[in-house]
Image: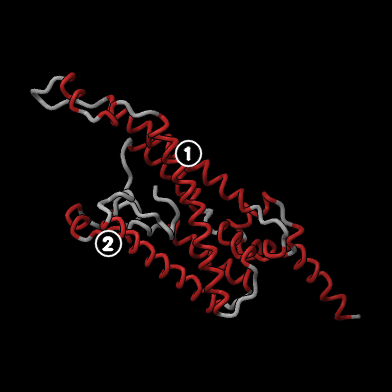
């Protein structure tokens, strides 16, 4: 009787914190940010993981960033001052048609569509690697459970796009991706692979990797050490994917968008 009276309340609290039935869509969104471990434990037992919400809010932030960037670029073109000795009409005539007559479809719709496709491919990639790594090390979860956890660990991408949008609107210029700012222009050109990898690393990437480690531990029931190894496997596979993309893009003469604009497997679509 004494044991029942002392452990009963603790059991109720535990169920309230981790039972999937207690979680709502809003609770998941907030919980991933402030209480990821308890949230991922509850998410594991839910029939629906509402991963589409992460896609929707990230897409909304992506659209915001794309619109802001297109607006800044358009204003820069309108305020373009031709060099001395060149008339405004001559400068306009020498501008590429794509720059002077670019439509909203090209400047907004296409980047957004490509960004959404990249998001979905990134979700699948992250889910597959996390599931495979955890399975190898003895994890206990289904692919569905691991996939929706993996999607929710990308929520820092939403904050990245919002901050980038504010930065672009404030500075009226192009922002530097990740840690590429530590390299000079000459260094970036002479060390393109290092420049590509550094461009993937920022505070949002680190935050996402921490969430992935917590999510793997809570979802697959692996220990802390094995969960860290699973994250490291994901990072290594992501780097290999980036290097393959770099090699293929160079081999095809930049037909895939250029090696400097990698798909960003670790951090989501590039901003």
Residue 100 image position (x, y, % from top left): 28, 26
In percent of the image, x 63 and y 69: which residue is there? 219
**Viewer-proximal residue among 75 and 86:** 86
Examine the image and state in which quarter residue 97 appears.
top left
On the picture, is 60 further left or further right than 248?
right
Circles 2, 1 touching at the beta carbon (< 8 Å): no
Where residue 248 sits, quadrant-wise, is: bottom left
The residue that mark 2 highlights is 193
Viewer-closest of 111 and 213 = 111
Residue 236 percent coordinates (x, y): 41, 70
Q: Classify residue 240 as left or right of residue 12.
A: left
Q: For the image shown, how many numbered marks are present on the structure?
A: 2
How much space separates mark 2 and mark 1, taking CA atoms? 29 Å
Q: Which mark is residue 256?
A: none
* Location of residue 120 in the rendering, given as x and y in whole percent from the top left corner: 52, 52
Please name the residue shown 23% across and 30% down the image. Answer: 96
Residue at 30% from the left image edge and 49% from the top image edge:
255
Q: Quadrant of the N terminus?
A: bottom right
Q: Which residue is mark 1?
A: 63
The image shows residue 104, relative to residue 235, as above or below, that is above
Q: Is residue 178 above or below residue 211?
A: above
Mark 1 closeness class: few <14, some 14–19, many ≥20 residues within 10 Å: many
In x, y percent, where is residue 205?
A: 44, 59
Label 2 sits on a secondary structure element that is: helix
Question: Judging from the image, what secondary structure is the residue with disc 1 in?
Answer: helix
Q: Residue at x 50, y 65 (%)?
A: 210
């Amino acid at each position: 009787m004494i044991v029942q009276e002392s452990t009963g309340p603790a059991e109720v609290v535990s169920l309230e914190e981790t039972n999937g039935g207690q979680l709502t869509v809003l609770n998941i969104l907030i919980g991933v940010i402030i209480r990821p471990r308890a949230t991922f434990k509850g998410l594991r037992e839910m029939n629906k993981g509402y991963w589409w919400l992460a896609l929707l809010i990230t897409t909304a932030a992506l659209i915001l960033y794309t619109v802001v960037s297109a607006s800044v670029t358009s204003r820069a073109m309108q305020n373009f001052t031709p060099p001395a000795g060149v008339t405004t009409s001559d400068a306009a005539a020498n501008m590429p048609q794509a720059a002077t007559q670019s439509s909203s479809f090209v400047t907004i719709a296409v980047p957004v569509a490509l960004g959404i496709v990249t998001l979905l491919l990134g979700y699948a990639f992250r889910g597959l690697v996390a599931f495979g790594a955890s399975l190898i090390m003895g994890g206990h979860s289904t692919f569905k459970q691991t996939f929706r956890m993996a999607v929710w660990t990308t929520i820092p991408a939403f904050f990245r796009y919002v901050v980038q949008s504010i930065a672009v609107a404030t500075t009226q210029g192009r922002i530097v991706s990740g840690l590429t700012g530590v390299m000079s222009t000459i260094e970036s050109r002479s060390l393109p692979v290092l420049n590509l990898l550094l461009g993937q690393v920022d505070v949002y990437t680190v935050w996402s990797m921490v969430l992935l480690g917590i999510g793997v531990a809570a979802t697959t029931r692996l220990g802390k050490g094995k969960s860290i190894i699973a994250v490291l496997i994901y990072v290594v596979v992501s780097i290999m994917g980036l290097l393959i993309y770099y090699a293929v893009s160079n081999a095809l003469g930049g037909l895939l968008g250029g090696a400097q604009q990698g798909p960003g497997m670790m951090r989501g679509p590039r901003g």
